[in-house]
Amino acid sequence: MDEMQKTVLNYVKNEYLEDEEQEVGVETPLISGGIVDSFSMVSLKRFLENKYKIQIPDDKATPKAFDTVVSICALVRQYVK
């Protein structure tokens, strides 16, 4: 797990998990698994944009792109210089 994956995973755990015992990893389905909803996805997108000083186009911020930490990091890396 690289630094970006750790950062995103920690954010998801701290912001969206109610049960601290729930296991979440970089391949855990976040949206399709019910951990992140559409409202939460917007706040996650905002967090990523602020943290990495990027702008993610709305049409790229899809539920599929935000479904796992791995897919989120792949999306972010497209915009990080």
Image (cartoon, rainbow, N blue to C red):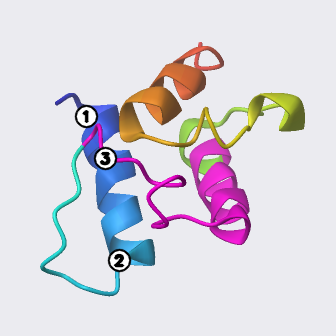
On the image, which quarter does residue 81 sit in? top right
Pick out the residue farthest to the bottom.
18
Please, what secondary structure does the residue beneath circle 2 have? loop
Say which of marks 2 and 3 sits in front.
3
Of the residues shown, which amino acid type is indicated by label 3? Answer: Thr
Find out whether residue 14 is within the magenta segment: no
Q: Which of marks 2 and 3 is nearer the N terminus?
A: 2
Judging from the image, what secondary structure is the residue with disc 1 in?
helix
Q: In which quarter of the image is residue 62?
A: top right
> Label 3's element?
loop
**Residue 49 rendering spot, x and y as whole percentages:** 66, 43
Q: Alpha-carbon distance for marks 3 and 1?
A: 17 Å
Residue behind mark 2: 17
Range of residues picked out in magenta: 26-49
Identity of the amino acid at label 2? Leu
**Can you identify the residue that label 3 sits on?**
28
Residue 57 image point, x, y percent: 84, 31
User: Which picture quadrant has residue 31?
Assistant: bottom right
First reached walking from the N terminus: tag 3 or tag 1: 1
Front-most of 81 and 16?
16
Circle 1 crowding by C-alpha within 10 Å: few under 14, some 14–19, many from 20: few
- Look at 31% across and 47% down and name the residue there: 28
How much space separates mark 1 and mark 2, taking CA atoms? Answer: 20 Å
